[in-house]
């Protein structure tokens, strides 16, 4: 057991008779490690993108609420009359009259 461990530490498995098989395994393991690292970086990048998009959605929702409340204020009759006073347009003093149309069906 001790001799096998020392052989591994000295690297004898890389120069022995069946070394090409060992080299292929090392290259394969290195390739797998590279793929795992790339996958991890890709996942982290996507997590950051999701966080940024979530923050943008929150900002857009807040902006929507602000714009909607501004629109509701602009639709008020008092605000409309205030804006129309600048153009010298005022509300009517007399209320509108209802027009009734009678049809002549015989």
Image (cartoon, rainbow, N blue to C red):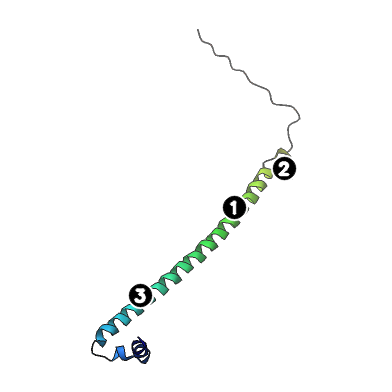
Reading the chain from its start, which is encountered first: label 1 or label 2? 1
The number of numbered badges drawn on the structure is 3
19 with respect to 79 (left or right): left
First along the sequence among labels 1 and 3: 3
Task: Please tell me whether residue 85 is drawn above or below residue 38 in the rendered image.
Answer: above
**Which residue appears at 51% of the width and 66% of the height?**
48
Q: Residue furthest top?
A: 106
For mark 3, give the secondary structure. helix
Residue 78 in percent (x, y) is at: 74, 40
Q: Residue furthest left?
A: 17
User: Which residue was labeled with disc 2?
Assistant: 79
Q: Closer to the camera, 72 or 13?
A: 13
Distance in Å between CA atoms under marks 1 and 2: 25 Å
Residue 94: x and y, percent?
A: 74, 27
* Residue 95, horizontal then vertical, whole percent: 72, 26
Residue ID for mark 1: 61
| Secondary element at tag 2 | helix
Nearer to us: label 2 or label 3: 3
Question: Circle 3 is placed at which residue position?
Answer: 32
């Amino acid at each position: 057991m001790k001799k096998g461990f020392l052989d591994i530490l000295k690297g004898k498995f890389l120069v022995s008779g069946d070394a090409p098989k060992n080299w292929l395994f090392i290259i394969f393991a290195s390739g797998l490690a590279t793929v795992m690292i790339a996958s991890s970086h890709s996942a982290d990048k996507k997590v950051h993108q999701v966080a940024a998009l979530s923050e943008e959605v929150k900002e857009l929702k807040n902006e929507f609420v602000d714009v909607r409340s501004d629109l509701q204020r602009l639709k008020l009759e008092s605000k409309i009359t205030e804006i129309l006073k600048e153009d010298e347009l005022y509300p009517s003093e007399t209320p509108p009259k209802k027009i009734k149309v009678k049809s002549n069906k015989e």
